[in-house]
Each structure stands twice: as structure tokens, then as C-alpha cells.
Amino acid sequence: MRTGLSKDLIARVLGGAPKYTIQQLEEKFPQRNLPDGAFVTRFAPSPTGYMHIGGLYGALIDCKLAQQSGGVFMLRIEDTDTKREVADAVQIINESMDRFGLKYNNVPEYGPYYQSQRKDIYHSVVAHLLENGLAYPCFLSAADMEEIRENQKAAGFATGIYGEFARDRNLSEDEIIANLDKGLVPSIRLYSTGNPEQRIFCKDAVRGSIGFPENNEDIVLIKSNDGLPTYHFAHLCDDHFMRTTHVIRGEEWLPSLPLHVQLFRMMDWRAPLYIHTSTIDKIDEESGKQRKLSKRKDPEANVAFFLEAGWPVEAVIEYLGNIAASGYEEAKMKGQVKSFWDYEMRAKKIPMSGALFDMKKLEWWAKEFIGSLPVPELVNRVVRWANEYGNNAQRAMCKEQSYLTSVLSIERDNPKRVRKDFITWSQTLENVAFFWDELFVPNSEYEFNMDALREFLETYDESDDKDTWWAKIVAVAEKCDVKNGDVAMNLRVALAGRTNTPDLYSIMSVMGGERVIKRIEGVIK
Ligand code: GLU
């Protein structure tokens, strides 16, 4: 430990006296009054203008664990890196959370929730560290640090500001004052007393206790350029005073865990429980190897992709939920729960590695979900999507809403045997586009049996019930000496332009006599 700075000097170093004492902060942000076992979690994105699927995965876990335990889920905007900030970024985060149904509860008592608005808190905590010799002002310039780094590399030492390389860690008050008088603005660094030869044991709620070398780096707590905290220091202050019980974050933060535990111990605060989640990976098409979903290479890394392409948000949530809680699928299939939100997930079972995002598997969840929707809801969702993201043709289809409703009702009258061939709202429309004359593409390759089609037209009557209709097909088959199925297939291709369609009788009923005759005649001509 070094000697602490006087209150006056601290005020000078920080550009103002701290607003609160630690005691005052403890009182300002009291322990939350929640049931036993309640999780207080937060999603803490940096506003980069992009929401990664891994962020959504983490936020879902946060939200679910808080919700099912009667706790609180917060959204905290980690906007201390002003260089990286992008306009509208917060709006993108908020919109994504809203679309995917992740509701947070930022009660004003524990705010503000933008780190850039919490400077008073960080400065008050760092003042306490400065006063107790646990932190110090550091005047190293970027050039100084570069030089230190080069020397360390040349000598084969670990890089960083630590031990003998931490030039300013033992500056006296007079030396500090002299630097300030020169107009130099310091950063505030941790005065680390860790010894990397020794191990510190840190707990991850899923991985268990992990031993790390102690941290000896005098990491920056408060940056010199803007007086804002680094992630490490902000996390310490925020998760303590927001009374976070569980920090669920990506495994890229695991190496920082010993530092964070060190910071909490230094403050004599109880650290939250940490859960470091696996990255969301995919199997690379070229190499066949598993790798992280990449912002650059994979469109599906961006949650906006799913909205634009028309994936049901529920299916994405169900799928991500099942990655986080692998027992969910079985419970759902057994009918024990209706959605992921009803399933009791266990924090301890969150996978530590190898979380794979597989579009094929997502398709399955999407088919299940769309298959479960009542027709009016299905139509509603398709129309809403088309109006926001659809092309002209898709929007035109949605204008004829009653026809669209009839089309989408086909094979949906028996909830136990619903066709499960719709994946996205977009593909749902594409799948049934042939019902619209402007979008229908006649099949020019199929070898039609013109006789059969002609014979069918002779006897066709749009008011026939299904049995009468089928009897007529059988009669045509007999007359033309082909199989019943051949006649049906000829009609199918004539009407839909393809061989795989829903129930033929339903198609004809929905299309109506005029359209049916026109299409068959179109083929005959
Ligand atoms: N802002 C950090 C990130 O985006 C948050 C990590 C955390 O949840 O603590 O990675």
C-alpha cells in the first residue's frame, strides 16, 4: 500500500471534490427488497450500433433468470468509450429488446443507467481508493507507454504497467502537485499489490472455482482524456450499487475475473456471482470447423437479420432459450410448458462452451411456432412483416387480406395435423404466391396430359363437394387410362406451377372456379 492522498489533492486530481462518501452511496442505493433467491441481472451493451446474436442470447438469459425468480432485469448502457459510439445505437438496442420481448425494469432509484451519467459515483469511489493508497494518479503519456511496451517486448517481459514499470505509482504529493501545475492531466490507476506467483481463486457459478495468477497490473480505473471509467472499474461500481446479484457475460471476460475479484475485495464488497457464457458459434462452411459467429462474415450474427428476413421472433427466442437450457425442448415436446418463458431454467446448466447456432435447427423451431398460430394471428403477423420489410409483390398480396386469409387457412383446420412448412413470414408468402395471378409462374417444363385436363374441364363444377370432385377425377383417369394420382398431379401443376402443394381440393376451392378454369385453359392453349 502507498500513502493515501489528502482530500484537497484528490479534489484537484479529479477536477472537483467527490460528491459522495462510500457510506452515502451505500445509503443512496440500499439493498433491494426482493424475495430470497431473486436474481438481479443486467444486460450491459456498449452502444456500437449493432446488436449481435450473442448479445441477445445473454440478454435473454439475464431476463429469464430475473423474471422466473421474481428479481429485476436492467439495461445498462456502457457508453464510456466515446470513440466507439454511434448515433442511434441505443435506439437499436432498445428496439431489438422490445421486438424480441425482453422487458427490463430500470427503476429510477438505482439509476442513472447510462454510464456516462454516473461520473459522480465513479469519482466518489475512486476518491476513496486514492485516499486509502489503493489507487494513484498516473501521468504516463501515450508515448511513454509505447516506449515502456517496446522495452518490455525487447527484454521478453510481459507488457503492461506493473511493478517497476509503473513509473508513477509511488509519486509523492509534491511530485503530483508539480505535475498538475505543469497542466498534466492524470489517469487514475489501481495500485495493485497482487503477485502473479500467487494464485487467486475465483468462482464462476457454472465453471466452479478457477485458479488464476494474481493480477499485478496497475490497470486504469479512470481515463485521463474524459474522466470516465474503464469497463473494469465501472463494472465494480455499477454492479455493486445497482445491487446486481448475477453478472452473466461472455466468456471473453473470464481472463478479467481475477482483476474484478481483486477490486471487489479491495473495496470489501461482496462480488456478484459470475456466469461466463459460451460464445455463439457456427460450423464454418469452408473449413468445417467451429468458430464464433462473425459480424463480418455471417449475416445471422446481427439480430436485425432475423427481423428483416421475417423469422418469428418467438422462434429465435425459443431456439436461443433451448441453447441456454437444453432441457427445454423435451419439456415443450411433452407439452409440459408452452413457451420458453414458462420453463424453469437452471443457471448452473447454462453451457460453458460449444453453443452452436444452426439455421436448420432454427427452422425447426420456426415451423413449430408458425404451425401453432391460429390463422388470424398468422395473417396478422405476415401482414405486419410485409408492410415493414416486404417487397412490392408481398405487400400487394397482403392488401387482399380476406383472400390471403383463405389461402393461409388451407390445412389449418385440424390443430393436431397442421402443415409445418412455413419458416419465415417472407417464405410463407412466397410459398403461396401462386394463388395470385400476377405472381403465378406457369410450369413450362412439365409434360401435361392435355386429354386429362380437357376431360376434367368438361365436368368441373366449382360447387362440387369433395367426394363428387374426387369421383370426377377418378372418372377422368379411367377415361384417359391413367392413374387417379396422375390426373391430380396434372391439375396441381396447372394450378400451382409446381408438384408439391397443399391439398388440391382446398386449393381449387380457395382459387374459385373462374381462376381454376383460366389456369387450366392456359395450359391447354
Ligand atoms: N459492455 C460489456 C460488453 O459489451 C459488458 C460486459 C458485462 O456484461 O459485464 O462486453
Image (tube, rainbow, N blue to C red):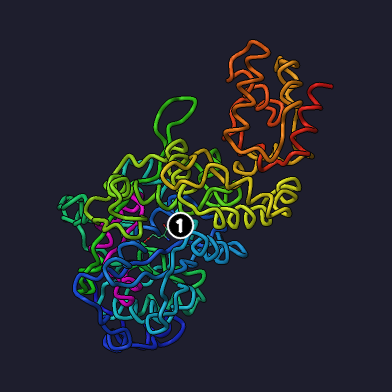
Q: Secondary structure at mark 1?
A: helix
The residue most toward the right is 525
Q: On the image, numbered disc 1 is attached to which residue? A: 144
Q: In the depicted view, which residue is nearer to us: 165 or 223? A: 223
Q: In the depicted view, which residue is nearer to us: 149 or 130? A: 130
- Quadrant location, ligand no. 1: bottom left
Q: Residue at x 32, y 71 (%)?
A: 239
- Image height of 432 relative to 163, above or below: above
Q: Please, what is the three-letter code of the amino acid marked with disc 1? A: Asp
* Image location of residue 404, percent across then percent down: 66, 49
Classify residue 113 as left or right of residue 439: left
Q: In the depicted view, which residue is nearer to us: 12 or 167? A: 12
* Image location of residue 402, percent across then percent down: 68, 54
Classify residue 398 as left or right of residue 315: right
Q: Residue at x 41, y 65 (%)?
A: 230
* Image location of residue 209, percent across then percent down: 16, 53
- Whether residue 351 is visible, yes or no, is no
Quarter of the image that includes the C terminus:
top right
- Image height of 357 relative to 53, above or below: above
Secondary structure predominantly adopted by residues drawn in magenta: helix
Quarter of the image that includes the N terminus:
bottom left
Q: Residue at x 49, y 41 (%)?
A: 294
- Image height of 77 relative to 256, above or below: below
Q: In the depicted view, which residue is nearer to us: 346 or 142? A: 346
Which residues are the magenta region? 236-262
Instruction: Give the quadrant of residue 90.
Output: bottom right
**Is 259 part of what is drawn in magenta?**
yes
Q: Residue at x 45, y 35 (%)?
A: 360
Q: How many marks?
A: 1
Q: Residues within 10 Å of mark 1 (few under 14, many from 20)?
A: few
Instruction: Give the quadrant of residue 342.
Output: bottom left
The residue most toward the top is 481
